[in-house]
Amino acid sequence: MVLSSAEVTVDYAVIQRETPDPDNRHRRTEGPVRTCIGCRRRELAVDLLRVVAASNGNGQWAVTVDSAGSLPGRGAWLHPDDRCIEAAVRRRAFARALRITGSPDTTAVVEYLSSAPAHEGQVAKNMSTP
């Protein structure tokens, strides 16, 4: 049996468009969204900590915290949480995300988090204070 185009009808009143879900966390519009290299969860960039790789010479790399967001080079994003740092080190995510060879030195990131008092949250760069 062959259907011709005259026999097929579509009732456009029945077709429904999907309405956006306001609770959908993947569709936020408050700012740029980045992925944590430790737990792989997506969060707003202001809620994550940016880290970059700095060369120590002789092919050695050290991961440093870029709290101002102005250091040059490729950055990676991380929750300011010990569990995410441990997961990133265990998964070797720093080298992969920063596109460097070898295992980088991450002591600066660990020291930064241990010196920060429970990390009270980063201030967004473009936010003005009242």
Image (tube, rainbow, N blue to C red):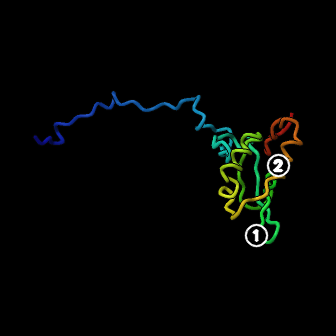
Q: Quadrant of the N terminus?
A: top left
Furthest residue toward bottom: 58
First reached walking from the N terminus: tag 1 or tag 2: 1
Q: Residue at x 76, y 46 (%)?
A: 49
Badge 1 element: loop
Measured as percent of width and height from the top left, residue 37 is found at 67, 48
Disc 1 versus disc 2: distance between alpha carbons?
A: 25 Å
The residue sitting at 79% across, 57% down in the picture is 105
Q: Amino acid at mark 2?
A: Ser
Q: Nearer the viewer, residue 102 or 46?
A: 102
Q: Looking at this rendering, what residue extends furthest in the left direction? A: 1
- Residue drawn at x 83%, y 43% is 113
Q: Which mark is residue 117?
A: none
Residue 72 sits above or below residue 130 on the image:
below
Q: Position of residue 102 (x, y in %)?
A: 70, 63
Q: Does residue 105 lie above or below 12 as drawn?
A: below
Q: Which residue is label 2 attached to?
A: 67
Using a 10 Å C-alpha cutoff, classify the residue at mark 2 as few (fewer than 14 neighbours), some (14 to 19) or many (20 or more).
few
> Looking at this view, is 45 or 100 the one in front?
100
**Label 2: element kind:** loop
Q: Which residue is mark 1?
A: 59
Q: Amino acid at mark 1?
A: Gly
Q: Quadrant of residue 36?
A: top right
At horizontal 81% and vertical 70% (from top left) the residue drawn is 57
Measuring from the top left, give residue 75's x and y in whole percent.
Answer: 72, 55
In-front residue for pair 128/31: 31
